[in-house]
């Protein structure tokens, strides 16, 4: 057993403006699936920074993509018929979206258009994509969550190599969600939300995986959601429904608890700021982006290299 780690707080960096909120407009399909209620007016996710320090986030409930400048000004840049869940930026500037409804998408921010890139795998539709991460050499790892959980542990993890070839790495995850690579890129972390744990998979040089295990067992809340890694290899976990982000060492020891100052749905996170030591957290219950200062810079995104 571990002792309770030290804790620190957050501040509100930005909030989705009222003009973009859509109370009473959530689809009956999402309500019946347990993904919100008639009062839901936003559900933000997928934070990622571009080279200019702008933060991109998505709203899965209403098919929206936002850009937030370093001063916290929120701008709606795309609205479409989709459910964007995760977002990452390629080093060539392309913006990739893991869309729960449509598959893997690309955002043309100049035109405000979201276009499909991969809609199916071997003629089969995805269950519902959730999150994604790039490796240094350009491979893209992404999770296919759908409605999987302990009642149906058929969630999948895919890899698209730098040539565009797609392969399925895992097909037995109860609700695969956030995904991250350690600095050496020989370990792939997967948040198995409904199992309330973090899986660790050893990555082989050919891109395949082996020795998959339960790395961290959590409790309470809705389960682990988004993941991020710092330059020392520490793992940050957004614990949805718990109102916290946890920092774990590469050995899985809890080092820090970061408490939300607004709502309990800490869904995802990204490092930003000039020195990459500011941690930004999407809190979906209040539609706020929170910020806190950490002692180790975040691992640079593929887009910044």
Image (spheres, helix red, strand yellow):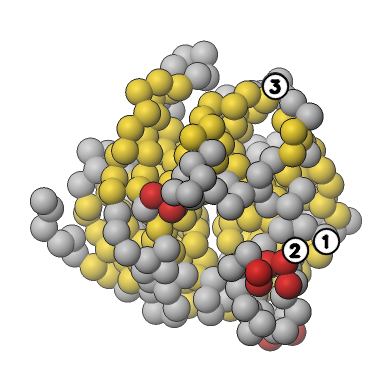
Q: Name the residue under label 2.
A: 63
Looking at marks 3 and 1 on the same chain, the residue that comes earlier in the sequence is marked by 1
Q: Is residue 13 left or right of 60 when viewed as pictured?
A: left
Labels 1 & 2 near each other (Cβ < 8 A): yes
Helix, strand or loop under label 2 = loop
**Residue at the spot x=49%, y=41% of the render?**
153
Res. 227 visible in picture: no
235 vs 225, nearest the viewer: 225
Asked if the residue under mark 1 is in contact with the one under mark 3, i.e. CB atoms within 8 Å, the reply is no
Q: Quadrant of the C terminus?
A: top right
Percent coordinates x, y for residue 85 in the rendering: 63, 55
Q: Nearer the viewer, residue 30 or 100?
A: 30
Q: CA gap, disc 1 to disc 2?
A: 5 Å
**Number of other residues with Cα within 10 Å of mark 2, as a class: few under 14, some 14 to 19, many 20 or more:** many
Q: Would you say residue 190 is visible in this rendering? A: yes
**Mark 3 nearby-residue class (10 Å; few <14, some 14–19, many ≥20):** few
Horizontally, residue 229 falls left or right of residue 161, namely left
Query: Residue at position x 59%, y 27% from top?
Result: 168
Residue 24 is situated, as x and y percent measured from the top left of the image, at 72, 84
Comparing 111 with 139, the one in front is 139
Residue located beneath label 1 in the image: 80
Q: In this view, does 222 lie above or below 304?
A: below
Residue designated by label 3: 165
Find residue 271 and report its horizontal and vertical position in percent.
47, 54
- Farthest residue in the right direction? 111
Q: What mark, if any, has residue 39 been given in the picture?
A: none
Sequence-first disc among 1 and 2: 2
Going from N to C along the chain, the mark reached first, 3 or 2, is 2
């Amino acid at each position: 057993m571990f002792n309770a780690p030290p804790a620190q707080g957050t501040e509100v960096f930005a909030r989705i403006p009222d003009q973009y909120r859509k109370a009473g407009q959530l689809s009956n399909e999402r309500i019946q699936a347990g993904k919100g209620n008639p009062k839901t007016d936003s559900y933000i996710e997928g934070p990622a920074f571009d080279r200019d320090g702008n933060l991109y986030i998505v709203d899965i409930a209403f098919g929206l993509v936002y850009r937030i400048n370093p001063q916290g000004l929120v701008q709606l840049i795309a609205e479409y018929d989709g459910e964007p869940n995760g977002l990452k930026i390629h080093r060539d500037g392309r913006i990739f979206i893991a869309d729960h409804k449509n598959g893997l998408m690309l955002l043309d921010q100049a035109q405000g258009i979201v276009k499909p890139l991969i809609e199916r795998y071997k003629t089969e539709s995805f269950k519902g994509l959730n999150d994604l991460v790039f490796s240094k050499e350009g491979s893209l790892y992404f999770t296919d969550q759908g409605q999987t959980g302990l009642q149906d542990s058929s969630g999948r993890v895919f890899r698209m190599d730098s040539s565009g070839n797609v392969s399925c790495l895992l097909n037995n995850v109860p609700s695969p969600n956030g995904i991250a690579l350690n600095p050496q890129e020989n370990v792939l972390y997967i948040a198995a939300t409904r199992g309330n744990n973090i899986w660790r998979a050893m990555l082989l040089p050919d891109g395949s995986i082996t020795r998959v295990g339960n790395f961290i067992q959590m409790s309470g809340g809705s389960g682990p959601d988004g993941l991020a890694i710092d330059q020392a290899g520490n793992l940050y976990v957004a614990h949805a429904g718990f109102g916290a982000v946890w920092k774990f060492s590469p050995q899985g020891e809890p080092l820090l608890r970061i408490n939300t100052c607004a709502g309990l749905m800490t869904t995802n996170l990204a490092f930003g700021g000039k020195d990459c030591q500011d941690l930004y957290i999407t809190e979906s219950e209040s539609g706020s982006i929170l910020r806190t200062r950490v002692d180790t810079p975040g691992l640079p995104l593929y887009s910044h290299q």
